[in-house]
Image: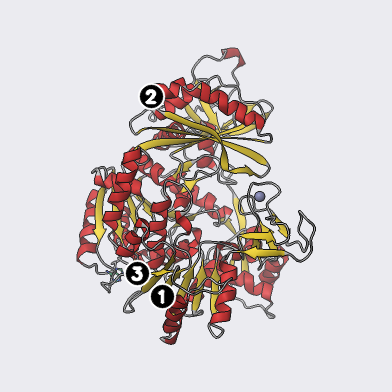
Amino acid sequence: MAEPGFYPEGARVSVLTTEPVGKPLDYLAPEGGCFPGAFVEVPLGPRRVVGVVWGPGDGRFAAEKLRAVVRVLDVPPMRAELQQFLIRMADYTMTSRPGVLRLATRTPGLFEPPGARKIYRLGAGTPARMTDAREKVLGVLGDHGGAGFYLTELAQLAGVTPQVVKGLVAQGAVVETEAPRDLPYPRLDPQLPGKALSGDQAAAAAALRAGLGQFGVTLLKGVTGSGKTEVYLEAVAECLAKGQQALVLLPEIALTSEFLARVEARFGARPGEWHSGATQAERRRLWRMVAEGGAQMVVGARSALFLPYRDLGLIVVDEEHDSSYKQEEGALYNARDMAVLRASLAGAQVVLASATPSLESWANAEAGKYRRLDLQSRFGTADLPEMRAIDMREERIESVHWISPSLVGAVQATLSRGEQAMLFLNRRGYAPVTICRACGHQIGCDHCDARMVEHRFLKRLVCHQCGETKPIPTACPSCGVEGKLAPVGPGVERLAEEVAERFPKARTAVLSSDLFGSARALKEAVESIAAGGADIIIGTQIVAKGHNFPLLTLVGVIDADLGLQGSDLRAAERTFQLMRQVAGRAGRADKPGLALLQTCQPEHPVIRAILGGDEEAFWRAEAAGRRAVGVPPYGRMAGIILSGPEVAPLFELGNQLARNAAPLTRIGAQLFGPAPAPIARVRGRHRVRLLIKAEKSAPLQGAIRAWLRGVKFPNAVKLAIDIDPQSFL
Ligand code: ADP
Ligand code: ZN
């Protein structure tokens, strides 16, 4: 992997492709030669595929059989730093190398020859006749401030046919131009002044600025509204001023637009945007511009970590505790941890920002591996919301109702002051269970070991595992009796019914990820609520994630005990984080907030810790508990998931693996299972789990590799290895 190097024509090179062939294959360098890291097209069997020149050939393949690289593609070669990152990540997460290369090249159209393409942008004209469809197109163009789109993308974004766009072109309201592809991004100006920072904000910003230019990790802790974003934007400014690139990872697309507007206000232009909702053209442009230096800053989802930065100086992981940083399908990795790995190779700084850090990061700060900076109070006000429990054992509550009289009273008082109230219930849909009152049958998914959830809004039952839906039957599918199916338990949609009954005059809004077709629709709903468009907000955990509602002063948690059920090792931590995040929505600026938690176990240590507000005490207790049993972050774990159409071969294989676990026991690891996974069937595939537990310093991946080497996996059986699992389902 010699970066200053060159392979002359005919030299043996090894090329890694994204094809599942395992290891890099040898080829001959093409006419004109190639550099290490070059993106190339190579023949593979009868096909041509794209790959990366990974290093010198290993010489094992017979010279006369070697084929030549077809051509070198017109994109900057992969830098040694990114290659190293992919290799280290593949080794750590036990993902194949083609699998990690796929993450770094998953940009449609990336390797098409450059050229000019027609793009469509806002024109000066106004259409003679305005229609809904036309308005949608102009709305999309307006939202993207001057940016151009390809025809199909624009039509798709607006939800109209391409003819509508063409119609607008004829009227001069949209202009069609030939544009060279992939223009550099407008320049961000780091010299523009930021907000005047308060004492601890200024100190934190200075510390972050001083760290730039070398590897280091900082945990930036502060309650919602304490100014973490303002502070890390100062570090971004310094990074840009040094001519380096900055990456800000956000856990949710819906947060991006609010953040982009903030960056624009701070630096005078928008950064590159990287997530599944960004257009194909934008992603392609960003990939290239990041590599060529035409993009100073990227805001994006976890996959933005795999972009080919030319000179990465800073990675911010905002809401670092968020479980969505863990990719749970395909390559299983935690973007927070991989951000630290990449920064260590790039010599960059990492800022992990959170009001409620993960225990992992908290422990790393305790151990002195990460620096910790605390912002003490909310900007402008000193007060965190007051938090109180409502003891549900003492409330008189009618059947099929979930809002206690105490909470009803608090909501009324809030509304009468002209302020907003939020009711939080972490359950999508209308009712989690549909039961037959005649035979007791619960309607389940045909393909998964999961109950179907009624979504009244969609008028369907939905499986939250596989997404399968079916109409709500009138007769029980088991006993055939008509009219006896009944919903059991509340989801947010059902809670909304109760709210309508109790507060008939209030305007309510339900925020649940499944109720919005797009990030844009969700964003619009959030903006309208923030502007006072609703009195009562009913929401799932989507509301916990950083949206600002300035009029909100009361948060009522319908079931604070929900997350404490189950045996997940992070149940306490997650409940603590979620409750504190949700409560943190209440009260801003000059209005004090109140958070009320409905619970049947107010004496539970986690509930007490949430109410008591002594966060350090909570983490210390949680850390001690985990240390005592040797689980993360004080021990290591790996999940092994076997899946297939038949259950018997899975257990057979699982048992065989358990019997031959010597490589694991040799490093002192323990193996549990095989056992049916808690969700034992998903999409028609049965699932069996094994769990490995080892000491923190144990060479876990090597042992797993040795253990699985030579094991014959039946064709239909799929193996997934989950290092540092977050989910045990
Ligand atoms: P956090 O990221 O911790 O939730 P933010 O950085 O979003 O906090 O700050 C919360 C609000 O307070 C934002 O509207 C922000 O602009 C404002 N704010 C924070 N610090 C300052 C400051 N020093 N001067 C002016 N406004 C500030
Ligand atoms: Zn299903």
As drawn, is 612 to the left or to the right of 321? left
Disc 3: which residue = 387
Q: Is the residue marked by circle 2 packed among few (<14), some (14-19), or many (20+) residues within 10 Å?
A: some
* Rendered position, 398 above or below 65: below
Depth-wise, is mark 1 or mark 3 nearer the camera? 3
On the image, which quarter does residue 174 sit in?
bottom right
As drawn, is 655 to the left or to the right of 544? right
* Rendered position, 228 above or below 100: below
**Residue at (27% x, 55% y) in the render:** 616
| Residue type at the position of mark 1 | Leu
Looking at the picture, how far across and down is residue 567, in whole percent? 46, 47
Q: Earlier in the sequence, mark 2 or mark 3?
A: 3
Q: CA distance from mark 1 to mark 3?
A: 10 Å
Looking at the picture, how far across and down is residue 557, in whole percent? 45, 67
On the image, which quarter does residue 594 sit in?
bottom left
Q: Are marks 2 and 1 in contact (CB under 8 Å)?
A: no
Disc 2: which residue = 667
Q: CA distance from mark 2 to mark 1?
A: 52 Å
Quadrant where the image shows the N terminus: top left
**Residue at (26% x, 67% y) in the render:** 377
Looking at the picture, how far across and down is residue 266, in whole percent? 35, 66
Q: Secondary structure at mark 3?
A: strand
Q: Secondary structure at mark 2?
A: loop
